[in-house]
Amino acid sequence: MMLSTKAAHVVSRLTPGTRMVLRTCAYGVAGALVAVTFHVCIQVLYLNGIVRLSRASEMTFVIGSFLLIASTSALSGWLLSSFCPAAAGSGIPRLKSAFWRDFGYMPASMLWVKFVGGVLSVGGGASLGREGPSVQLGGGVASSLAGVFGEAKQKRRAAVAAGGAAGLAAAFNTPIAAVTFVLEEIIGDLNSRLLGGVLLASVVGALVAQGLLGEEPAFSMASIGSPESWGYLATPLVAAIAALVGGLFQKMALSVRHWNSGIQAIVPWVRTMIGGIAVWVIGCVVFHCTRNTGVFGLGYEDLSTALRGELPAANAAVLLGAKLLATAACYGLGGCGGIFAPTLFFGAMTGVSVAALLGTFLPLDVSTHILLAVVGMSSCLTAVVRAPVTGILIVFEMTHDFAVVPPLMIAALVSRAIATRLSKHSLYDALLEQDGIGIDQVVPPRDLRAWQDSPVSRIANFRPALSREQTSEGLRALLGSSEYERFPAVDNAGRLLGILTRAEAQAASSEDRLPRLVPAPTCRREDSVRDAQVKLIESRTGMIVLVAGVDERVIGILTLHDLLRAEFALSGSG
């Protein structure tokens, strides 16, 4: 007790800047530790499962891998559906949503479900990655740690950004790429005021990972040296094809996920198990034909083989098609894992395949083949994630070879141009859109004028509690089911009658009479935030009602609370 009192006294004497640095270091350590632990648990399960089975007889592998992947996928799906459905998938979209909509607050329940579900899913052989979950776990642990430090729920963005960067830096051992990913994808601003904290936490995370796991990156790669001129000439072609592959994967994953969301007859954990069994079927066929296990789990063993120039082109082409199908099925059916590793796998196999095809009539050496493989990795990742700087830096930090930078920059330009034509959003933003979370409702605009000119639909509440029956019984039922103070009152057709206050509803129900309604100002979803602000000031109830159609049906509301919350988000986004 005396020691803790002395420690608290010492901390209280530190300047705010010093305390912030110490907290950021703590976020970095915590994010890295959870990411390293996550990696080790996945590795232990995978090595003692798929890898050990692959060294036995083929029949043993087929039976054993089925039992393993079916049971782990089912158990992971049960955990997700029973305790935290939001923990499914890669975790990046949820982290982005938590950063902007919830000011960095993430519930602790999501962490253990994500951790256990991810270990079972990826370690059990599902065709998913660990990097996205590592980012979410790092951000979530940092958010909880910020709460321990006394940070309010609405002031945890810096913690989440720092923890997420540390998690990715530890997962890939690429601290610079981790910084740019958080700034590009989560924050959406390379000049964010959070840059210093993200950078510090990323360095701390990388140091922790190197101390525990060593200095090697996630997978090994042969030295490229000085690329031939043919490598530069082939780079745009490989980048274009890899971008198309990334776009194809995005459409496949979203299509399967949309189909999965419409199924009600099959319980969620069974669907997740079906995704695992789909991976098993595809993986066993590929294993029988090529003896490669890259369809299962991360696929880093086959990826490293390709990056050493030792993977036959025919095997690479087979692995590309198989991994595409397996990952789309597994991810779309609710698997708990990310798409970072599979996307890099797609790109590398695309590069190896195209390089082999070009090598039939061009004099390409082994170094050029490897160069085109890493070009494919960077291009496919850029097409799916829309983070071109991250795509360049990840490969550069893995190779430590400046010669790859110019081809990667060319590839990023080509990939970005093609990806934007194929889809408006990155896969992460498309997932939010598919879940009914519009990206324009998540990330605020960058300046006041853009904010005031943006549509009111950006900040409105489209799930209001409505008063549909103004009888005494209807009023009592409404009061019992909701704690709100004001309700839009509508008729049977959903048309606005006025605003019902809670006090008036209580009085009308006790006196057995119809309530007296307050006139309500209205607007449409395309009206500007500027116009809505004026109407809110003039409103007697602090509420305006959104209507649509010629009959002006009620579709949502906007309150002063909604407006202040959105403006607070805008002020804290820098």
Image (cartoon, grey):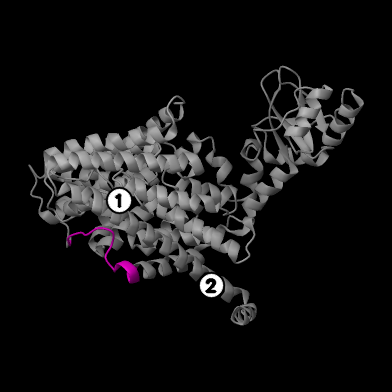
Q: Position of residue 43 (x, y in %)?
A: 29, 56
Q: Position of residue 404 (x, y in %)?
A: 24, 58
Q: Quadrant of the C terminus?
A: bottom right
**Classed neighbour count for the residue bearing mark 1: other residues with Cα under 10 Å, few (<14), some (14–19), many (≥20):** many
Q: What residue is rendered at 57% in x and 76% in y?
A: 18
Left or right: residue 89 compared with residue 23: left
Q: Nearer the viewer, residue 489 or 247?
A: 489
Gap in Å between the C-alphas at discs 1 and 2?
Answer: 33 Å
Residue 193 visible in the shown view: no
Q: Quadrant of the N terminus?
A: bottom right
Q: What residue is rendered at 48% in x and 53% in y?
A: 111
Q: Amino acid at mark 1?
A: Ser
Q: Nearer the viewer, residue 45 or 445?
A: 45
Q: Magenta span has 215?
A: yes
Query: Can you identify the residue that label 1 sits on?
Result: 378
Q: Amino acid at mark 2?
A: Val
Query: Can you identify the residue that label 2 sits on?
Result: 21
Q: Nearer the viewer, mark 1 or mark 2?
A: 2
Q: Position of residue 86 (x, y in %)?
A: 50, 43
Q: Position of residue 241 (x, y in %)?
A: 25, 40
Q: What residue is rendered at 63% in x and 45% in y?
A: 451
Left or right: residue 83 compared with residue 527: left
Q: What's drawn in magenta, residue-wise? A: 210-223
419 relative to 115, above or below: above
112 relative to 79, above or below: below
